[in-house]
Amino acid sequence: MNYKRIISLLLFLQCVAITLFLNLSCKKSPTEPTDNIKPGSRNYVWTVDTLNYPYNTIYRIWGSSPSDVWAISGGGDLDKTIFHFDGNKWTTDGRLRPISPSSIWGFSAKDIWIGGMNGMIWHYDGNGWKEIKRLTKDGNTQIVFDNMWGESSDDFYSFGAYPTNEGAPNNSVIAHYTNNTWTILNTDELIGLVEHLYKNKVDNRIYLQVIRMGGGEYFDSTLLYEYYQGKYNKFYSSIWDKGVQADISLINNEVYFILGNEIANRIDNQFKTMLKVENPNFYQRIWGRNEKDIFLLMTDGLAHYNGIDIEYLFYFTLANKLPWTQIFGAVIFDKELFFITYEPTTNLNLIYHGKLK
């Protein structure tokens, strides 16, 4: 028996096994921060534009570039509900339109959608806005499309709710547009206003945030669902109150879960905490470019997490005063960003515009 050959073969197999183990153990999980991502810069120059339109609160914002940003308001005069920023100033064209818009999403400067009350869907093709569809569910025409999101112009969602008999917007609605057709999804398992809906690239599943309004039967609460193979799985809920409420945000095609003071990813149906925000002023809303460039709403201003620590970028004029100043939405580009901000006490809509130096 040739013992030298056997020993050599065993040593070779051992080396192969060790190499395979090291290669497998060194692979990063889909949500593990990559070393080549640099901490996000905080070197912004900020300007603030005031949109003083009485009785109009601007809720949603979307843009194709820093010189093509749109914002919409669901109240007030119908000739002042769609606003546009051309890189220099915010304007409205002053045209009366029979729509009270409450959501906006787009895919290019000539392909933008808005949803509004009474199930209305409008479209902008670069030349002007026009009504495309009025959707109903179970014969109900009082649908309010509170938000929109999608991956492409032939695969996107508009969602919200319509009132129950008690008047609370708890009859959930999700409309899916694909193959040039609108389909109302079955949402009988849901109760509440569908506020956010995103597809998570990591596991290719859709996640929803649903806000359930009180009114006797329920407490105001936030509920998180997974939508997979036509079914809704509720996996988290909390009271809808500052400090403990839940939310979701899409950052670099990955869904981030805001669970009170924790920001987490979801892996194999389990939460993995990415960051604990110790500041009690955290207001459970985030936006970002990647895991090292995240913006956090605080009751007194806007803060930033760069993968290392959290620092404020600016403070609100009315910091920590009730009712709290709100940031309802943001649009983020490589070197510029816009935050739509509302001061309830002054009824002012403010656009915080940041430019990296």
Image (cartoon, rainbow, N blue to C red):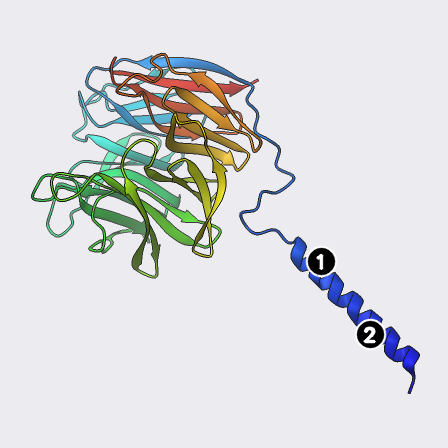
> Which of the labelled discs sits on residue 107, or is there none?
none
Disc 2 residue type (three-letter)? Leu
Disc 1 residue type (three-letter)? Leu
Q: Is residue 112 visible?
A: no
> Which of the labelled discs sits on residue 10, or is there none?
2
Locate residue 198: give its quadrant.
top left
Q: Is residue 199 left or right of residue 44?
A: left
Identify the residue at horizontal 35%, vertical 39% (top origin): 247
Q: Is residue 272 above or below residue 38?
A: below
Q: Which residue is mark 1?
A: 22
Q: Secondary structure at mark 1?
A: helix
| The N terminus lies in quadrant | bottom right
Mark 1 is surrounded, within 10 Å at the Cα level, by few (under 14), some (14 to 19) or many (20 or more) other residues, namely few
Q: Is residue 344 above or below residue 228?
A: above
Q: Position of residue 176 (x, y in %)?
A: 29, 50
How far is disc 1 from disc 2 in space, using C-alphas? 18 Å
Q: Position of residue 33 (x, y in %)?
A: 58, 42
Between residues 88 and 304, which one lies in front from this camera angle? 304
Mark 2 is surrounded, within 10 Å at the Cα level, by few (under 14), some (14 to 19) or many (20 or more) other residues, namely few
Q: Position of residue 120 (x, y in %)?
A: 20, 39
Identify the residue at horizontal 55%, vertical 22% (top origin): 42
